[in-house]
Amino acid sequence: MLIFECPYCGIHADETELSPGGEAHLKRFGPGASDEDFEGYLFMRENPKGVHFERWRHSNGCGKWFHAARCTMTLEVFGTYKAQTFEPPQEIKDKITAKRPGWSWRTFS
Amino acid sequence: MSETETASFPPFNGYVTVSKDASIGMITLRGALNSKGLGLAVGKSLPKERCILDAKDMQVAWMSPDELMVLCPKENVANLEADFQKSLGSQHALVSDVSDARAVFTLKGTNVREVVAKLAPVDMAPGHFGTGEMRRTRFGQIAAAFWMTADDEVKIICFRSVAQYMYQQLCVCAARGSELDLWT
Ligand SMILES: [Zn+2]
């Protein structure tokens, strides 16, 4: 069972209080984009064994969307952070580096 | 209408009693949650994160970083709503009467904590949850919020459309013979 601390209300919410929102930090390509970019935005996803970034919503709670960094293999949670950002905060990256030196995910490392 | 409602929710006498409250007034406030924002509407009585507090003739509950819920007698809703609108002026904020959207249930008995713990993923151990706190969560498969008015009384609100589901699961979990005696 995953347990995330909601960065908006502080509750340590278990999975049943949350809704998964898929991969984090996707850049939207809409009207006017190339077919390749649009396809990438719609369909291309990471499927890592290890460090991963996701969006979750505290749906049975304060209702806010937030980000989570976790390990898909061990289910270890590195941390959660607010939605108003384009990339993981340095503090989260440092936590991951401490536990998974040399990690990388898309353009982040 | 009110007759059918009463008929569907008879008071239940389990090892904890379950009853449906008469409909109360509820006003949702959304906007900046500080003294210059929603604080202007509810006065000094701005609840802390995840708390509910008693103010004059109303209770104010923290629902999210930009949302409050005001609970009051139904006949006060129109006046309060107008007051809130007035004090917020041209601020970007929402004041909405949502009294008809939700149902309220009361659990009463020394084992109320246990009945809540059977249905919601919340640590109900004494010392971990108590009066003054407002918790939004789920009960079974539906979203709900609850608070304790005393150590033996819990108020639960959920959407009215799922009130029957809430009532039935509360009755099952409060049935005699299903005591766990976790904290008594
Ligand atoms: Zn939350």
Image (spheres, rainbow, N blue to C red):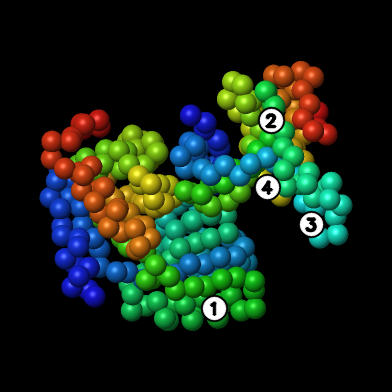
* Some atom of ligand 1 lies within 8 Å of the CB belonging to the residue at label 1: no
Could you give the CA–CA distance between mark 1 and mark 4, rounded to whole angstroms?
30 Å
Q: In the rendered image, which residue does mark 2 sit on?
A: A47
Q: Which residue is mark 3?
A: A30
The residue wearing badge 1 is B85
Label 4: chain? Answer: A
Gap in angstroms between the C-alphas marked 2 and 3: 23 Å
- Tell me the element at label 2: loop
Q: Is residue B172 visible?
A: yes
Query: How far is disc 2 from disc 4 in space, using C-alphas?
Result: 21 Å
Please determine whether, in this image, residue B157 is positioned above or below residue A87. Answer: below
Residue A83 is marked as: 4
For this view, does B173 lie left or right of residue B73? left
Cα gap from disc 2 to disc 1, whole angstroms: 49 Å
Residue at the image point whose x is 39% and y is 39% from the top: B122
Q: Nearer the viewer, mark 1 or mark 4?
A: 4
Q: Which mark is residue A60?
A: none
Tell which tag, 4 or 3, sits nearer the viewer: 3
Q: Amino acid at mark 4?
A: Ala
Q: Is residue B15 left or right of residue B112?
A: left
SS type, badge 3: loop
Residue drawn 29% across and 69% down?
Answer: B23
Q: Earlier in the sequence, mark 4 or mark 3?
A: 3
Amino acid bearing label 2:
Asn
Determine whether B25 is above or below A57 in the image.
below
Residue type, numbered disc 1? Gln
Cα–Cα gap, marks 4 and 3 = 21 Å
Q: Nearer the viewer, mark 2 or mark 1?
A: 2
